[in-house]
Amino acid sequence: MTGPWRVAVAGVALASATTLGALALGPAPVPAGASAPARVTITISNFMFHPMRVRVAPGAVVRVVNHDHVVHTLTALGAIFNTGRIRYDATRTFRAPRRAGVYRFDCTVHPFMTGAIVVS
Ligand SMILES: [Cu+2]
């Protein structure tokens, strides 16, 4: 995957996030032009990531907290980042990639749990 391709994908994703802002899940999206946060927290509850899609700065610190009574993971497709197994009430932290793009992830234990980190 080349750099320009990833940047193009991120551009499309941001454009749709802006257009569909009112329909987006989770907190209000960061306005276009504002800098993306350097730290975010993703919580897991009821077998869902909250928020399911989050915009972060390159290399941002991402905290993941599991509120479910079962083990989950937050694992990027291709395992570019991976929390490993997170038990009930445990927290794991990792750094987002430095390269702009849309990074989809799931839970390796429950692959129907999906989300995305948008680095921009
Ligand atoms: Cu899971």
Image: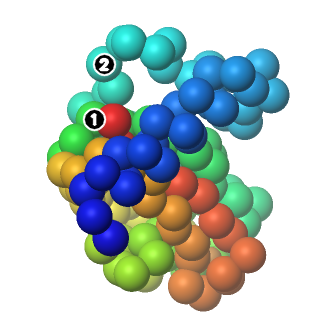
Tag 2: amino acid: Ser
Residue 46 visible in the current orientation = yes
Tag 1: amino acid: Ala
Q: Residue at x 62, y 49 (%)?
A: 52
Relative to 22, is 75 on the left or the right? Answer: left
Query: Which residue occupies the extreme right position in the image?
Result: 23
Q: Residue at x 30, y 19 (%)?
A: 35
Does 41 sit above or below residue 96?
above
Do tag 1 and tag 2 residues touch (Cβ < 8 Å)? Answer: yes
In the picture, the disc for residue 57 is: 1
First along the sequence among labels 1 and 2: 2
The x, y position of residue 82, in whole percent, is 35, 74
Q: Mark 2 points at which residue?
A: 35
The x, y position of residue 37, in whole percent, is 32, 27
Residue 87 visible in the current orientation = no
Foreground of the two, 14 or 69: 14
Foreground of the two, 62 or 19: 19
Q: Residue at x 46, y 36 (%)?
A: 11
Dot 2 lies on which element? loop
The x, y position of residue 69, in whole percent, is 65, 72
Relative to 41, is 70 on the left or the right? Answer: right
The x, y position of residue 119, in whole percent, is 35, 43
Does 37 sit above or below residue 45?
above
Quick one: label 1, few (<14), some, or many (20+) residues within 10 Å? Answer: many
